[in-house]
Image: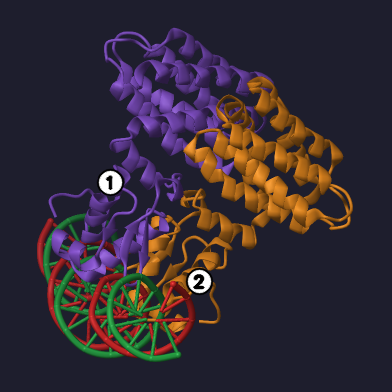
Chain colours: A purple, B orange, C red, D green
Amino acid sequence: MTSGEGRGLHATLLASLGPAITSGDCPPGTVLRTDELEERFEVSRTVVREVVRVLESMRLVESRRRVGVTVRPTEEWNVFDPQVIRWRLAGRDRPRQLRSLTVLRSAVEPIAAGLAARLASPEQCEELTRHALGMVSTSRGQQLESYLVHDVAFHHVILRASGNEMFAKLGDVVAEVLTGRTQHHVMFTDPDPAAVTLHVQVAEAVRGGDEERAERLTREITIGAMAELDVLAP
Amino acid sequence: MTSGEGRGLHATLLASLGPAITSGDCPPGTVLRTDELEERFEVSRTVVREVVRVLESMRLVESRRRVGVTVRPTEEWNVFDPQVIRWRLAGRDRPRQLRSLTVLRSAVEPIAAGLAARLASPEQCEELTRHALGMVSTSRGQQLESYLVHDVAFHHVILRASGNEMFAKLGDVVAEVLTGRTQHHVMFTDPDPAAVTLHVQVAEAVRGGDEERAERLTREITIGAMAELDVLAP
DNA sequence: CCACCTCATAGATACGACGTATTCAAGAGG
DNA sequence: CCTCTTGAATACGTCGTATCTATGAGGTGG
């Protein structure tokens, strides 16, 4: 076992096998045998079996008697599993994953903003305007890290305020998309002023309970995000 | 072990513990001990541990030394895991889950339809019109089961034709929503004629490559679905 | 050529042992 | 009386081995 992120053999092996599969190093159809994994990673049967069970629950692999552990075709993977998403974002088909997520965002966030306009609590409205203003004040002069913090927080609040648990869960994923985008940015360019303005206006619309406007403005933001992706990604 | 769905002790125990947690029988904060589960379900330590590991990967529970296996708060669950969705749909907060999913549909499907209008293959267009016509021909005279088959297939094709792997993955979930809706329907009423017409028109729009129209019409369908939910659910 | 049977294989399950982190509480010191 | 340290109990983590069982392959006989 060369490395690993979480403590414990289980987490370590999972952090090795998961990415190996999602990155395509073990393409669909590949057969892994339990005892081979045992010796390759120098862990006990117990650890291997538990990891395989987890990978099986993510539908990345299928374990069959007399055959071994087979990697399933990509289209059967649980692509909504945050763990799988993280592995894919860190691996080879990061562009593809980024595109999928951005399209998902473009579908979900406008609706979420509309719902937020109806349901957001006063505290959430306050948070929203605070982060929007934070984005304004950090939008100039190479402060992209601080800007990103506000940007992520802004979208997190919107998704939580929508009152939909599934939307809320997408907050973490969106955070990774935004973070990844900034990491790939040339760090010398400031964020698009138009986008900053849009965020402020969305905060206003939500605060004012204007569903239709919140939705429309957020849709403009996501359209911008997709356009940006077309420029940056292959 | 009273019952179970899949063959094998692992699947059986998972099918007992999962629903027990998602239904609220074991509310967040509940602590389960490994050996207690062993004797309660009459399985070995191995099986319990592997099941706990899977539940942990779904973020339903957290296993800590000297403490036991604690049920995590609801907002930390992997609510996009199809298995979790199925358990919740079968359990107590089915209405809440159904509402979340319907809102998600209303966000995703219109965008998916728009993309499908641009990307659908001739075969997919053919499938689409076939199922739309199938819906028409089964929309009268207590043929809800046949109607449902076409309805599910229709939305499946739309989501797949969008070219987005994440959208495509939602097809199975949407199928369960539609199925569940029909199961709760009074079986004597035929489907809404307006909805049937909309499906036919969506198929036309996709076939004709009219993105804007496909999106708008699909949005009308999902609006109808939400309205229907308001009538049926608490 | 096909249907059926046998056997080897590799995962599925079980059990017992030891390691280790974590918590809680008792006791020493201030 | 309060705080900090230290120790022991505890429940999960890891390991090795043994047995069971499903299943795919290959042989056998009709």
SS of the residue at dot 2?
Answer: loop
> Looking at the image, which residue is at 48% across and 54% down?
B73
Disc 1 is attached to a residue of which chain? A
Quarter the N terminus of chain A occupies: bottom left
Judged left or right of residue A165, residue B180 is right
Tell me where residue B69 sits by quadrant.
bottom left
Label 1 neighbourhood size at 10 Å, few (<14), some (14-19), many (20+)? many
Which label is found at residue B6? 2
SS of the residue at dot 1?
Answer: helix
Compared with B151, A36 (above or below) is below
* Residue B125 at x, y percent in the picture: 64, 34
The amino acid pointed to by label 2 is Gly
Judged left or right of residue A126, residue B179 is right
> Looking at the image, which residue is at 16% across and 59% down?
A41
* Residue A78 at x, y percent in the picture: 44, 49
Can the viewer see residue B50 in this picture? yes
Tell me where residue B43 sits by quadrant.
bottom left
Disc 2 is attached to a residue of which chain? B
> Looking at the image, which residue is at 33% across and 33% down?
A94
Quarter the C terminus of chain A occupies: top left
* Residue A153 at x, y percent in the picture: 44, 29
Q: CA distance from mark 2 to mark 1?
A: 28 Å
Judged left or right of residue A146, residue A201 is right
* Residue A216 at x, y percent in the picture: 62, 19
> Looking at the image, which residue is at 30% across and 15% down?
A143
**Residue where numbered disc 1 is placed:** A19
The amino acid pointed to by label 1 is Pro
